[in-house]
Image (spheres, rainbow, N blue to C red):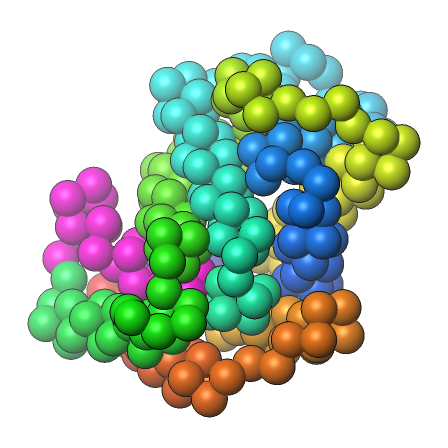
Amino acid sequence: MSVSYKKQHPLKGVLFFMTAIFLISVVDTVCKVFTKDLHSIQLVWGYFVGINLTLWVFFLFKGEKFSNLRRTERPLLQIIRPAFLVCSISSLFIGLTYLPIAEATVIGFVAPLFITALSVPILKEHVDIHRWSAVAIGLVGVIIIIRPGGDLWHLASVMPLLGALFFALFQIITRLLAATERTHTTLFYTGLGGLAWSSLIVPFVWVTPSITHIFVFLSTGAMGAMAHLCMISAFDRAEASLLAPYNYTKLIWVSVLGYLIFNDVPSLDMWIGAIIIVSAGFYVLYREKNINLKM
């Protein structure tokens, strides 16, 4: 069964999606720079402050009423979902404190594989042996990158992997909400819930921010909100199966930014691991597309 989209403009959809990926790459890079000054949790909190301010400007521009935004049929999921996003971003930022940005990003690419694995107990989906094999192969790619016993191996190297797991849970709940919830309602709870959850833990690591730090909070939050809106625009104009592969362009952006700002040169192990993880991700996408075509 085909899906009806508001506007069928695949090229515009790809451009919106790649813009979102670029903005997210810049956010990660900026936050890595400032992990020397502030704890990752405080950077996440500031990020959600900026997201909320930007979203409220957007909602006002769109003429959205608060009563409509807060109306939800699944309040518990709307509350839990941003908690997983906070945990995901926090884990990634902790990893970025110690790891090269390209390596941390590639490890995060296993999120689609985790979604495949978790869709069995949570969504009650059937996952065949081919996709289970792809999950296992993707994890082999992660092991090659973090090299237990090697230079990258310490507790922080596990954090992007943990972040990918939390992001997979975030995405699965997003799937559950998509059937009943308005996009703007879910965006509203993402921003508000993210700020609320991060506010519970930020007092334990709080450092009085400078004017520069406040600018970082607002700018990264604004870019994060714009990335969310660009993704919504992308999915309105193109099928998810077309857009999904472009998620891997993030590796290009972070490799370039990592080299220019941190003088990081990705290792051979990273590229080998990246090829394995990305290939596994493409295979899962291919299998899911074929299964959907048969339904």
Above/below status of 275 relative to 31: below
Q: Residue at x 54, y 20 (%)?
A: 204
The magenta stretch is 107-126
Q: Position of residue 186 (x, y in %)?
A: 54, 31
Q: Quadrant of residue 64?
A: top right
Left or right: 140 as drawn, with respect to 231: left
SS assignment for the magenta stretch, majority: helix
Residue 110 image point, x, y percent: 36, 64
Drawn side of residue 104 relative to residue 121, left or right: right
Residue 7 showing in the rendered view: no
Residue 58 among magenta residues: no
Q: Residue at x 28, y 69 (%)?
A: 148
Q: Quadrant of residue 138?
A: bottom left
Rendered location of residue 289, percent (x, y): 33, 72
Q: Residue at x 16, y 68 (%)?
A: 132
Q: Residue 94 location in percent, x, y?
A: 51, 46
- Decide: is 281 above or below 195: below
Q: Is residue 266 left or right of residue 253?
A: left
Q: Is residue 128 visible?
A: yes
